[in-house]
Image: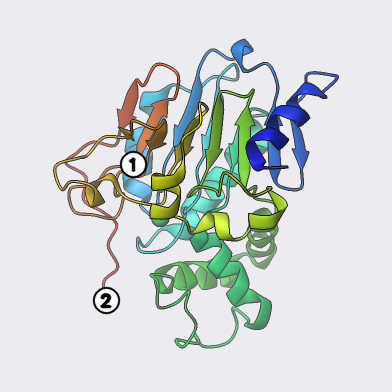
């Protein structure tokens, strides 16, 4: 069964109306009960841009909010961003965090490496913007080792996809429409063109992963493609980038203040 059919079937069989988590596939029945369905795109350690965005949203518990992944790397404040997202999830039952490819790379690193050892610069994570995150996590480990382990546990609990009813699908990068969820659970975090060119179904798919500036350097706001893909990665780490939140039904958008520079690493 392909992933879209799978979502339809699973949503149909939910009995009690509660949000369910099926191995990282989060099912949100009756999304019409939420005042807004919100998504926040890639943050990439850009703490000051996230702090500039957050109060504008005026989040309330009758909103559903999905973070689309890539909290860490490139910017200097990955550890802080992770802790804030973790705290928000602890406090609010209708906030969901997805994993991005950067979180997957980091978890892969810590399967065979320790935060107590020097950085292994041969690993792909540390060559893909992971070094400032490593340094931030090492500081956290030194001041509060329990908290550091809680952050790693939180990363292991992140989800791959969330479906609000059958009309809205949230995921970090994309999916192969003809494959099942299980078949592609790891590939999903990396797709770009394959997904943008192949997707031709009705549900609106809300993604991050590729900065909108990649499509045109003039874009700074989330971008809705003709085939119902909504890209919310507004280049949080780029000089003219933003961290963005969008109401995925009405397409109302909130962004970090354009005057705030990225939290760029010093090296
Ligand atoms: Mn990203």
As drawn, 33 above or below 14: above
Q: Are marks 1 and 2 in contact (CB under 8 Å)?
A: no
x and y percent of residue 67 in the render? 51, 40
**Residue at image point 85% right, 20% down:** 15
Q: Nearer the viewer, mark 1 or mark 2?
A: 1
Which secondary structure, mark 2?
loop
Using the image, determine if residue 135 lies above or below residue 165: below
Q: Which residue is mark 1?
A: 243
Q: Is residue 180 left or right of residue 87?
A: right
In the rendered picture of this protein, how many numbered marks are placed on residues? 2
Q: Secondary structure at mark 1?
A: loop
Residue name at image x 77 percent, y 22 percent: 12
Disc 2 packing (10 Å; few <14; some 14–19; many ≥20): few
Foreground pick, 44 / 214: 214
Disc 2: which residue: 267
Residue 192 visible in the displayed image: no
Work out which residue is located at the far left of the displayed protein and give it: 218
Q: Is residue 215 left or right of residue 252?
A: left
């Amino acid at each position: 069964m392909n992933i879209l059919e799978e979502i339809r079937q699973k949503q149909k069989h939910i009995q009690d109306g509660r949000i369910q988590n099926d191995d990282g596939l989060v099912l949100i029945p009756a999304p019409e009960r939420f005042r807004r369905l919100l998504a926040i795109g890639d943050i990439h350690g850009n703490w000051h841009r996230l702090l500039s965005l957050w109060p504008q949203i005026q989040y309330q518990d009758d909103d559903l909010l999905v973070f689309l992944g890539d909290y860490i790397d490139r910017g200097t404040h990955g550890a802080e961003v992770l802790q804030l997202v973790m705290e928000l999830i602890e406090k609010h039952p209708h906030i969901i965090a997805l994993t991005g490819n950067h979180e997957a790379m980091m978890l892969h690193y810590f399967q065979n490496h320790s935060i107590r050892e020097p950085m292994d610069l041969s690993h792909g994570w540390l060559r893909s913007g992971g070094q400032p995150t490593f340094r931030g996590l090492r500081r956290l480990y030194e001041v509060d080792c329990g908290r550091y382990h809680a952050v790693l546990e939180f990363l292991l609990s992140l989800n791959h996809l969330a479906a609000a009813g059958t009309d809205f699908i949230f995921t970090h990068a994309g999916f192969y429409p003809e494959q099942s969820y299980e078949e592609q659970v790891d590939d999903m975090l990396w797709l770009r063109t394959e997904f943008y060119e192949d997707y031709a179904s009705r549900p609106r798919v809300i993604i991050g992963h590729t900065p909108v500036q990649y499509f045109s350097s003039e874009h700074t706001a989330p971008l809705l493609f003709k085939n119902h893909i909504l890209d919310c990665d507004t280049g949080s780490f780029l000089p003219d980038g933003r961290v963005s939140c969008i109401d995925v039904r009405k397409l109302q958008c909130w962004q970090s203040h354009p005057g705030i520079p990225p939290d760029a690493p010093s090296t």
